[in-house]
Amino acid sequence: MRTAVDTNVVSAVWSREPLATRAADRLGKAHGAGGLVIAAPVYVELLAHPNATPEFVDRFLTDTNIVVDFVLDEPIWRAVGTRFAAYAKRRRQSAGGPPKRLLADFLVGAHALIRADQLLTLDGGRYAQDFPELALLAV
């Protein structure tokens, strides 16, 4: 079973947040059940983590056997487009104003839907509405 990993899971481990131990445990179990993968936007977000360097990020990914999928092809972009458009429409219709979620979240969700079996995240609710058929593994 291939598990896509959201930025917030790795960030929680690196920042030693209260959920860090649980996040690390879930990463280990997901690795044991199959491969771990991150989408290119997750890699980019990890580089923005305080005190992270490209060398640190690459070493962590190598040490944890997390593969970076840098190729986001047409099926992923189409899924991102349709789901982001539906989100934007719901947001406008609810008088909530312009979209507030980042496009990167939709890239992560679409990548997990198309290239993995499940998504490991701290924000299950964020993905559940826009990707209801995506299996979510919550921390």
Image (spheres, rainbow, N blue to C red):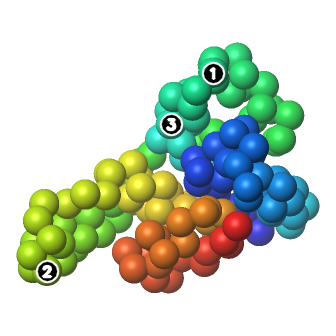
Left or right, 84 with respect to 117, comes to left
Q: Which residue is mark 3?
A: 45
**Residue plotted at (72% across, 22% down):** 56
Quarter assignment of residue 33: bottom right
- Whole-angstrom CA distance, mark 1 to mark 2, is 39 Å
Mark nearer the N terminus (3 vs 2)? 3
Tell me the number on the disc at residue 112.
none
Mark nearer the N terminus (1 vs 2)? 1
Left or right, 92 with respect to 40, comes to left
- Whole-angstrom CA distance, mark 3 to mark 2, is 30 Å
Residue 47's place in the image compared with 123, above or below, is above
Q: Is residue 74 visible?
A: no
Give the camera-side residue of 126 and 132.
126
Q: Is residue 84 visible?
A: yes
Give the camera-side residue of 53 and 62.
53
Residue 68's place in the image compared with 121, above or below, is above
Q: Which residue is mark 1?
A: 51
User: How packed is label 3: few (under 14 Cα within 10 Å), some, or many (20 or more)?
Assistant: some
Give x and y (percent) for residue 50: 58, 26
Residue 75's place in the image compared with 15, above or below, is below
User: How packed is label 2: few (under 14 Cα within 10 Å), some, or many (20 or more)?
Assistant: few
Quarter assignment of residue 82: bottom left
Q: Secondary structure at mark 3?
A: helix
Tell me the number on the disc at residue 94.
2
The N terminus is located in which quarter?
Answer: bottom right
Tell me the kind of residue under disc 2.
Ser
The C terminus is located in which quarter?
Answer: bottom right
Mark nearer the N terminus (1 vs 3)? 3
Give x and y (percent) for residue 69: 58, 42
User: Which of the two discs, 3 and 2, sits closer to the camera?
Assistant: 2
